Amino acid sequence: MKKGIHPEYRPVVFRDPGADFAFLTRSTISSDKTIEWTDGNTYPVVDVDVSSASHPFYTGRSRVLDTAGRVERFNQRYGKA
């Protein structure tokens, strides 16, 4: 790799405030906010809107759409050509 052209790759905490969930990983993203992690070290923190703790697919709260009902309603309204 060329020296001086790559961003710094360091530990960062990603936090989902809505689900009260956070995880520590490595990233090149920068942030002005910091948080003290459970190991006693301070890391930059990035707040995210959706994580695996709040996404409906991973939590099992996803909805199933009734597409057959929509097709039947369309056919009743406009008929088959």
Image: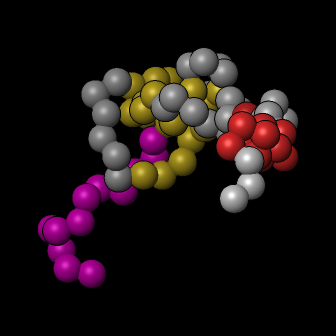
Q: In this view, does 68 lie to the left or right of 44?
A: right
Name the residue: 48% across, 52% down. 26
Q: Is residue 69 left or right of residue 20?
A: right
User: Which of the two residues, 9 or 46, is positioned nearer the viewer here?
Assistant: 46
Q: Is residue 70 visible?
A: no
User: Which of the two residues, 56 or 48, is positioned nearer the viewer here?
Assistant: 56
User: Which of the two residues, 61 or 21, is positioned nearer the viewer here?
Assistant: 61
Q: Is the magenta stretch mostly helix, strand or loop?
A: loop
Colour scheme: secondary structure
Q: Is residue 60 visible?
A: yes
Q: Does the magenta stretch include residue 6?
A: yes
Q: Quadrant of the C terminus?
A: bottom right
Q: Position of residue 68 (x, y in %)?
A: 84, 46
Vertical placement of 32 versus 7: above or below?
above
Which region of the structure is painted magenta?
A: 1-12
Vertical placement of 38 versus 25: above or below?
above
Name the residue: 65% across, 20% down. 20
Q: Is residue 36 left or right of residue 32?
A: right
Question: Which image quarter: residue 5?
Answer: bottom left
Vertical placement of 34 versus 62: above or below?
above
Q: In this view, does 81 lie to the left or right of 39?
A: right
